[in-house]
Amino acid sequence: MDFRVKRTARTPTKDFSNRRKFLLIFMMGCMGLLVGRAVYLQVFNKEFLQNEGDDRQVDEVVMPAYRGMIKDRNGEPLAISTPVDTISVNAKQLKEDDKSQITKQLKALRKARKGEKLSEDEKKQVLSDYQQDKKDKIRQMEVVLELPAGKISNLLKEPEPRQFIYVARQIDPGIADQVKALKLNGVNFEREFKRFYPASEISAHLVGFTDLEDKGQEGLEAAYEKTLKGISGRKRVIRDGTHQIIADIENIQEPVNGKDLELSIDQRLQYLAYRELEAAIDTHKAKSGTLVMLDVKNGEILAVANQPTFNPNTRKGLKENLYRNRAFTEVFEPGSTVKPFVVAASLDGGYVHLNDLFYTQGVFPVGHHVVRDVHNYGTLDLTHVIKKSSNIAVSQMALKMPPKYFWNVYHHLGFGVSAGVGFPGEARGNLLDLRRWHDFERATLSFGYSLNASALQLARAYTALADDGILHSVSLLKRDEDIDAQRVFSAKTIQRVRAMMETVIMKDGTAYEAKVDGYSVAGKTGTVKKSGGRGGYVAKKYFSVFAGIAPAKNPRLVMVVMIDEPSAGKYYGGLVSAPVFSKVMAGALRILEISPDQEETMPILLTQKNPR
């Protein structure tokens, strides 16, 4: 008989049923926990979560790009960007924040009293204290930002308070920190860049300025906006209840900083030009003045100054006429400063010769009109035509040249054509249409009337007289050579004309005041009556002009000085503009370490021996 116990195997169906019950119970338990947690958070801890949610929010902000610097040829900064803060107010948030803040203060007070119930008087006192504190903070904010009393508090009284109002733009970060310390909800801060101009008035017309959005508005800031501005970036951040950034989450796009601009300008020469031009305007009680200096060899603009000027760092009440760069944008009739071109064109074309004589008797009839000289110079050779600045003699030369040939010379020198420097509003000037060139127009064109040009255009034309007949393009950016230079006159002709122009600076010439001790100078004066439009020329109103080259023997610099409406008695270019040329050129030649070529004209410094 078999006594072994037989084990009964569990059936698969019963085993699966037990597991299902266990899983079902486990899942129901988890769901119960989740529901319980949700009830706790939504019902019992609702206010806490709402406060925490209000205190933290994810936002996407712009990361401003650093605007490129503008520097002179030696790396001196002319325009730089500095970090600043802009403050805006969400008046709706600032007003509606009262309830939550008062609730927080009441909770804090109850907690300090270990849950003791507050009386109605105590609640009213908390409310009163809060309102007074907020009022004090708002007034303090107005004081710090130098705003009119009530500027911010009045925003809260509007029926529908606005959600965004700028109250201070581009302020010093230190001032912004004082406002941040007040911890007012609804007061928001944004980091920006503000443009600063270290050279201030000295280079204002050239560099220009930007607006509050850091966008170029005038001058090179506007002309090179795309180069300077860069590309803003973006990042995701966490803000607190006061809308302040408390943490960075991630960078979405890195900012790309703008490129620097390296100018051809030498700030040392720019200061000289600014200083002497300002002194001349004051001395001669003139309306305005302008000066342009070029490098003879490559057409770089080394200095360009205008008076009156302005401070680009503070532009309150600034009028448009003050920030126009007259050297580039305004034109005038160049007068006798063009006579060397007429002599050069006549010689180059074979229409006059070196030994030719010109008979002047003070007046020269041309058709129904008369050309006059200041004095009766009698018979003049070519050198004395330039030295004495005879209108009659150059008129005779002009009438010998075919109109088309004469027109082409002026055209190739850049008259009536933009100098192409890329400056906003750059003037083209005006050269009388060839079809209107009758005899009298040809005569007046020879001594600088019936055409107009900017100071820059005239200075550019003078590079042909300085660089042995080669006309240069002009540039405001630093460069080694001028690939667009072109020959206008033969070198031999220009060397002869330049020698004639040196006599203008002699004692009996028209511009002795333009002399520079130790250096030879070639130049030409211009005293031009101002046009009154169709009414003809205005009595006793002149442009006083001087255009010169130094050293004349081996030219390095060209300069044009124009003073508009001098009214202190003197108005001739040789007495008003030539002295400015002399002072600025003397300083420039020393700064650039250009060797003297006439050492015999340098002043002798006498030293007294010390007594024994």
Image (tube, rainbow, N blue to C red):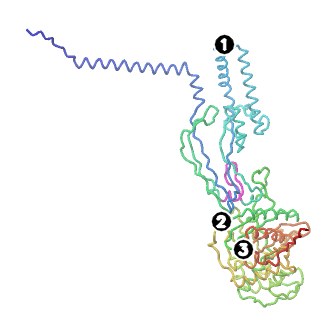
Disc 1 secondary structure class: loop
Which of the 4 quarters of the picture holds residue 430? Answer: bottom right
Residue 117 badge: 1
Identity of the residue furthest to the front in this view: 612
Q: Which residue is mark 2?
A: 478
Determine whether 255 is above or below 456 in the image.
above
Magenta-drawn segment: 207-223
Question: Is 84 part of what is drawn in magenta?
Answer: no
Which of the 4 quarters of the picture holds residue 611? Answer: bottom right
Q: Which residue is mark 3?
A: 556
Pick the residue in front: 592 or 142: 592
Nearer the N terminus, badge 1 or badge 2? Answer: 1
Identity of the residue furthest to the left in this view: 1
Quarter of the image where the N terminus is located: top left
Disc 1 versus disc 2: nearer the observer: 2
Disc 1 versus disc 3: nearer the observer: 3
- Asked whether residue 369 appears in the rendered view, the answer is no
Pick the residue in front: 347 or 250: 250
Give the image location of residue 495, x and y in percent: 73, 83
Quarter of the image where the C terminus is located: bottom right
Question: How many residues crowd mark 3 within 10 Å: few (<14), some (14–19), many (20+)?
Answer: many
Pick the residue in front: 611 or 56: 611
